[in-house]
Amino acid sequence: MLSITCGAAQQSPGPAVKAEVRPPEASPNDIDGPTMFATLCGYCHQDGGRAEGKGPKLAGSKRSDEYIIERIRNGKSGAMPAFGGTFSEGQIIAILAYIRTLEDNDN
């Protein structure tokens, strides 16, 4: 009696393919940045972020997008509350986009 055994070929995983990481984008379902900013951020960032108040002026900020996103998400102890649990990623991106449209009238 002849018996044939077929075994599954063992393949080692190939090199890891690095997935392209795309930055989050605001979706049409997210509230627009200016409205969201005015609702919660404008109390501390005066004149829609164009003037210093309890928080710094944001118009003309030289901070990176990543820095601003991180600050919105996690806040700053004793200075700014964290909004990562309040805003969706899309809303944070919409707020960042709004901040980037602010013109620095002091220059």
Image: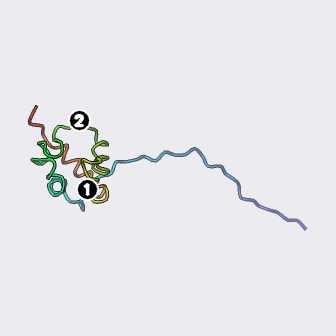
Q: Which numbered disc covers residue 8?
A: none
Q: CA distance from mark 1 to mark 2?
A: 21 Å
Q: Is residue 53 left or right of residue 73?
A: left
Q: Nearer the viewer, mark 1 or mark 2?
A: 2
How far from the left and from the top, in percent, is residue 85? 31, 59
Tag 1–tag 2 contact (CB < 8 Å) = no
Task: Point out the image quarter for the C terminus.
Answer: top left
Q: Which residue shows up at 28% across the image and 55% down it?
A: 83
Taking 77 as reference, is 7 above or below it?
below
The structure's colour scheme is: rainbow
Extreme residue in the right direction: 1
Taking 11 as reference, is 52 above or below it?
above
**Badge 2: how crowded within 10 Å, few (<14), some, or many (20+)?**
few
Q: Is residue 91 left or right of residue 5?
A: left
Secondary element under disc 2, as helix, strand or loop, is: loop
Q: Which numbered disc covers residue 91?
A: 1
**Badge 1: how crowded within 10 Å, few (<14), some, or many (20+)?**
many
Q: Which one is in front, 58 or 23?
A: 58
User: What's the residue type where badge 2 is placed?
Assistant: Lys
Q: Which numbered disc covers residue 62?
A: 2
For the image, the number of numbered tags is 2
User: What's the residue type where badge 1 is placed?
Assistant: Gln
How far from the left and from the top, in percent, is residue 105? 8, 36
Mark toward the start of the polypeptide (1 vs 2): 2
Secondary element under disc 1, as helix, strand or loop, is: helix
Q: Quadrant of residue 68?
A: top left
